[in-house]
Amino acid sequence: MNKNLKLAIMLVAASILGSGVTMMATSELQKKGVITDTYVLNKENKTTDDGFVKTASRPVDFSRDFTDVAENTINCVVSIKSYATPQQNIYQGDFFDPFEFFFGPGYGQGQRQRKQQQQQKSEPQPRGMGSGVIISTDGYIVTNNHVIDGAEKLEVTLNDNRQFNATVIGTDEKTDIALIKINAKDLHAITFGNSDAVKVGQWCVAVGNPFGFNSTVTAGIISAKARGMNTSDNGGIKAFIQHDAAVNPGNSGGALVNTAGELIGINTMIYSQTGNYSGCSFAVPSNTVKKVITDIKQYGTVQRAVLGIQYTELTAEKAKEEKITATSEGIYVANVTDRGAAKEAGLQEGDVIVKLNGSRVKDSGEMQEEMNKLRPGDKAEVEYYRDNKLRRTTVTFKNDQGNTKMTKQSDVMSLGCAFNELSREEKEDLAISKGIKVIGVKAGKFKKAGIRDGFIITDINNIPVDSRDDVENIYNQIMRSGESDKVMFITGFYPTGKKVYYAVDLSDDEQ
C-alpha cells in the first residue's frame, strides 16, 4: 500500500471518528440543557388560559432549513387592505354648462364625467395595504396601528384567499399596535415566543405581504435589541428589535418569528433613505405586543406604569461631571416628580438606575422595554447607585393620573367614531389650516349629539384640533377637570360648506 493511499484512509477514518464524537457530544449537551438556543418546530399548538398559543421549544436538527417555519407561519399571516372616502372639495357641485345650455344634451359630457368621478369618490376607496398576524383561532388579529388608522373599512385576506371584513377592537398609537377581529373560526394561530430570550446574532424570519405580494418569507439575523428610535414626541416606543430580514412597504404588521416558528415581534418600520428596504428593519417585541393586546381586551385601553422621573442616559461626560465612578452606564435621574412613585420609593435626583425588576437597564431603550411590561399597581425592585454606593428600593408604580388604579377605556373610544387626519392638499381645498374628519359614526356620544360622517372638526372648546391626539388630549383635560358639567363644544362644517356647532355631553363617562 503506497503512502498516498494510507494517508487518504487515515483522513477518512479521522473524519468519521470526529463526526461520531461531535454527534455524541451534541446529544449529551442537549440532554443536559446546554444547547437550548436552537429549535425544531413543535406542531402541537396548545392554547393557554390567557388565550395565546404556547409551545415548547426543542433542540434543532442542524440539517434543517426554514421550510418548516415558513409552512407553519404563512397561514397565520394575513393581508389587510384599508379603505377610506377621499375628501371632496366643498366648492365642487352642480354648475352652469354653457355648451349644454346652448347646444342641448350631449354637449355637457365634461360635467357628467366630473359628476360621475365625484360620485365614485364618495365611496370608500383603497388607501393602503399591510399585514396582520392571527393570534387566536376565533379571529383576533394583531397589526400595526398605522395600517388601519383612519380606515372606514378593513378587508382581511387569509392565505387561502378567503376574505373577511374586520372590526377594530382597540388601538395603541404609542406602540403602533392595533387589535382587530374577523368573524371566523378554526384559524391558524401564531405561537407567541419570549422576546426577552432573543439573542443578537440568532436567525429570524419575516413573514408578510410586501408590495401586495402575499405570503412572502425573508430570513436574516437579529441585529440589536432594545434599539432606541425617536419615532414620536408622545412617548412612543423606543425599544425595537432590529433585524436584517428584508422588510418593505406592505410588511407592516407582519410576523417576525424565530426558528421555532414562534412570534418574537411585529414588523413595524424600516430605516431607509429611499423608502424601501436597505438593511435595517424594526419590530415591536412580542412581549410588548402581548401586554398591549391583553390590556386592550381586558381593560379597553393600554395600562401604562409611570415611575415619575425625568432621565437621561449616563454618559462619560455626565459621569465625570457628577463624579460617578461606580458605574459607566445606566439611567441618570435628572428630576423626580412630586408625589410620584419614584419619590415615594426614595429615589432622588442624581441617582443612577442600573436594574429594574431584575433586568439591566443601561440605556433608555432597555428602560422602556422593562417599563412596557408593567401596569399601575405593580411592584418592582429598582437597583441604583447614589454617592457611588449600590442601593435597592421597591417601587409601586402609578398611572398617569397619579394613582394605582387601572385606567378606563379612554376617552375618544366612547365618542363612537373614528377620526381621519386631513392631508395638506385636502386642507388647501377646504381653505383651512387645521381640522380633522369624523368617520365611522356609530352608537355613541357623537351620534347622540347629531354628528354625522364627514363632519370636519376645526376646534373643540375653542382649541384648534388637527389630529386624533388633539381630540383625546382635550377629552382627558375635560374629564380631569373639577367642573360638574363635562361638555365638548365642537365647531366645524360639513362638505357642503354648512358650518355647525355641537355640544357633546360627557357626564356619563365620569370615573
Image (tube, helix red, strand yellow):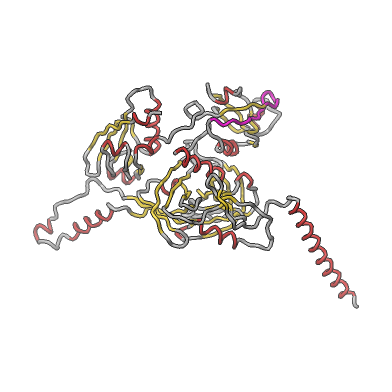
Q: Is residue 503 left or right of residue 33?
A: left
Q: Residue at x 53, y 21 (%)?
A: 339
Instruction: Locate residue 4, reporting x and y percent.
Output: 87, 74
**Is residue 15 found left or right of 88 in the rendered image?**
right
The answer to whether residue 263 of the structure is visible from this angle is no
Front-most of residues 422 and 171? 171
Residue 219 is drawn in which quadrant? bottom right
What residue span does the magenta drawing correspond to? 377-391
Nearest to the observer: residue 28 or residue 288:
28
The image shows residue 497, relative to residue 485, as above or below, that is below
Residue 79: give x, y in percent of width and height: 45, 56
**Which x, y percent locates residue 333?**
59, 27
Residue sitting at the far bottom: 1
Q: Main secondary structure of the magenta part?
A: strand
Q: Quarter of the image for the N terminus: give it.
A: bottom right
Q: Quadrant of residue 474?
A: top left
Question: Is residue 385 a member of the stretch shown in magenta?
Answer: yes
Residue placed most toward the observer, 469 or 179 = 179
In this rendering, the answer to whether 230 lies above or below 100 is above
Is the residue 203 above or below the residue 347 in the image?
below
**Could you tell me which residue is drawn at 76 percent across and 53 percent down?**
29
* Quadrant in the rendering for residue 479: top left
Can residue 502 be seen from the camera position used here? yes
Residue at (34% x, 23% y) in the render: 484
Q: Residue furthest left?
A: 102
Residue 159 x %, y %: 47, 60
- State left or right for residue 63 relative to residue 284: right
Image position of 131 (left or right of 11): left
